[in-house]
Image (cartoon, rainbow, N blue to C red):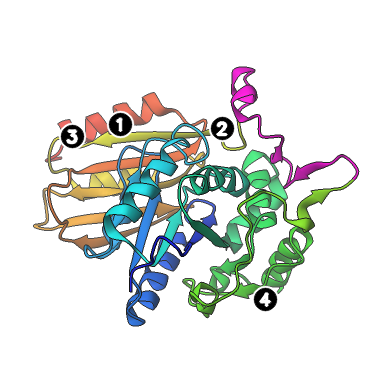
Amino acid sequence: MPASIEHSIPVHLLSGFLGSGKTTLLNQVVDYYKAQDVKVAIIMNELGDVNLDGQFVEGDVPMAEMLSGCICCTIRGDLSIELKELIDEHQPEVVLIESTGAANPMEIIDAVTEAALFMRIDLRTIATVVDGPELLERSRRGGKTFKLMQDQIRCATDLIVNKADKLAPEELVEVQQLVRELNAFAPLTVTVRCVTDLSIFDLAAAPKAKLAPSAERFDDTASGKHVCGANCNHDHDHDHEHEHGDYSSHSHVMTLTHYFAGPINSHAFEELIQRLPREVYRAKGIVTFTDTSSRFLFQYAYREVEFIRITPQGNVSDVAVFIGEHFGKEALQLELEELEQNRLG
């Protein structure tokens, strides 16, 4: 039965860095609800101009796309509108929000707080998917991305340490220790491809998250400020920070969205992907190759690329989205244009 206006609609936030496995988890949760005949709706957020992860979600699931920005910053004010329209039109019993991997969860909680002023919603869970191998590597190098990953872990009500199959036993122990040093309270599960007990998403489960940013374990009682990691001190003065150039924790993240005019050569494209600099840590898109008859969704994360044969629904353009830190966007754009010019090469 659709949630009535008298009842709060449960909202679950899926967080985690780029390529960690959030969309894999999202699809499992959707199937979990469908098996129980629970009507679910989705809000998916992408930094690029097109939502490619949405291609994995079945067409009968209501979905709102928030593109070209992050929920907590450039399109933060739109979250309330998207949530309200989604709930009014489809009357779901539960809403899943998959944030971009570059988002700080506490800033999203602030955005959901604003949405709660206009409708009855109940933020139940902040499930953070941790890319085990990437966390381990970033912990040894430091930098802004590692700080962002720390924030995502600190702010979780539930932790999923993913890609355990790509870690040696001693590395897995080290990753769990890293996570536990940052968040000693949230239940922690070690997974491969995010296969885990999904009971945390039960509609009858007691809420763990609070819409107001006041979770006791994050309180800095000495200062009176609410603290969540190196880049998450909130005095609810987000716009003031932007005016003074002190951008939020993912301001170092860059995106490039390129739409292809037609099919491209598969070998040349794979070679381009393999040449991507380390600063590009995520890429995905839909491409048509001159030497095959199918279209493919490709996903690239940390030097590994996967191609999945798909049949997109509706009018879906060929596109590639690249996400990274301070990479040469102009040079990459030129390479993509050259690839199109030499599509038969």
Question: What quarter of the picture does the C terminus occupy?
Answer: top left
Q: Amino acid at mark 4?
A: Pro
Q: CA distance from mark 4 to mark 1?
A: 40 Å
Q: CA distance from mark 1 to mark 3?
A: 9 Å
Residue 340: assigned label: 3
Q: Amino acid at mark 3?
A: Glu
Q: Which residues are magenta?
A: 222-247
In percent of width and height, residue 72 lies at 52, 39
Residue sitting nearer the eye, 328 or 117: 117
Sequence-first tag of 4 and 3: 4
Badge 2 marks a residue whose secondary structure is loop
Which residue was labeled with disc 4?
Answer: 169
Q: Are marks 1 and 3 in contact (CB under 8 Å)?
A: no
Front label number (1 vs 2): 2
Which residue was labeled with disc 2?
Answer: 252
Badge 3 marks a residue whose secondary structure is helix
Front label number (2 vs 3): 2
Sequence-first tag of 1 and 3: 1
Q: Residue at x 36, y 45 (%)?
A: 82
Badge 1 marks a residue whose secondary structure is helix
Relative horizontal placement of residue 332, taking residue 169 as reference (left or right):
left
- Extreme residue in the top direction: 244
Q: Residue at x 45, y 53 (%)?
A: 301
Residue sitting nearer the eye, 340 or 212: 212
Relative horizontal placement of residue 77, taking residue 342 as reference (left or right):
right
Residue 335: assigned label: 1
- Extreme residue in the left direction: 293
Residue sitting nearer the eye, 323 or 122: 122
Q: CA distance from mark 4 to mark 2?
A: 33 Å
Residue sitting nearer the eye, 246 or 263: 246
Q: Amino acid at mark 1?
A: Glu
